[in-house]
Image: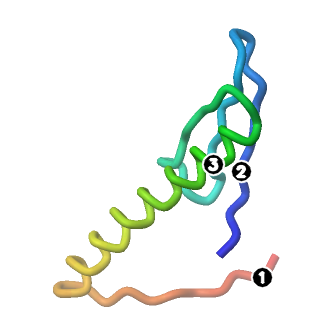
Amino acid sequence: MKYTIILEKEEEGGYSAQCLELPGAISQGESKEEARNNIREAIEAVLEVLNQEVKELREVVEISAVEVCV
């Protein structure tokens, strides 16, 4: 799956990165490449936590998807 990230050059050096679809996925790196690698790891970590939470929720609620067209 592809995610949209924002890479921002920091005044003090390096880059910060955040994922638009997963607000909890934030990272940084000294170079663009390092920031991209680090945000990939952050996205994987957030997804792992979310998947565990969804598994626990499925025991008590129904979870489904909806499509929105704009």
Local SS, label 1: loop
- Residue 23 at what x, y percent from top left? 54, 49
Of residues 32 and 54, which is closer to you in this image? 32
Residue type (three-letter) at the residue carrying disc 1 = Cys
Q: Is residue 6 above or below residue 65?
A: above
- Most foreground residue, 60 or 16: 16
Give the label, 2 or 1, closer to the camera.
Answer: 2
Q: Residue at x 72, y 15 (%)?
A: 13
Label 1: which residue? 69
Amino acid type, mark 2: Ile
Q: Which residue is mark 3?
A: 37
Badge 1 local density, few (<14 within 10 Å), some, or many (20+)?
A: few
Relative to residue 38, is residue 50 drawn left or right? Answer: left
Comes first in the chain, label 2 or label 3:
2
User: Does residue 32 appear left or right of residue 50 in this picture?
Assistant: right
Asked if 41 appears above or below 47 in the picture, the reply is above
Q: CA distance from mark 1 to mark 3?
A: 32 Å
From this viewpoint, which residue is outermost toward the right?
Answer: 70
Identify the mark nearer the N-term, 1 or 3: 3
Q: Which residue does the numbered mark 2 point to in the structure image?
A: 5
Q: Residue at x 37, y 86 (%)?
A: 63
Classed neighbour count for the residue bearing mark 2: other residues with Cα under 10 Å, few (<14), some (14–19), many (≥20): some
Which part of the image, by quadrant, shows the N terminus?
bottom right
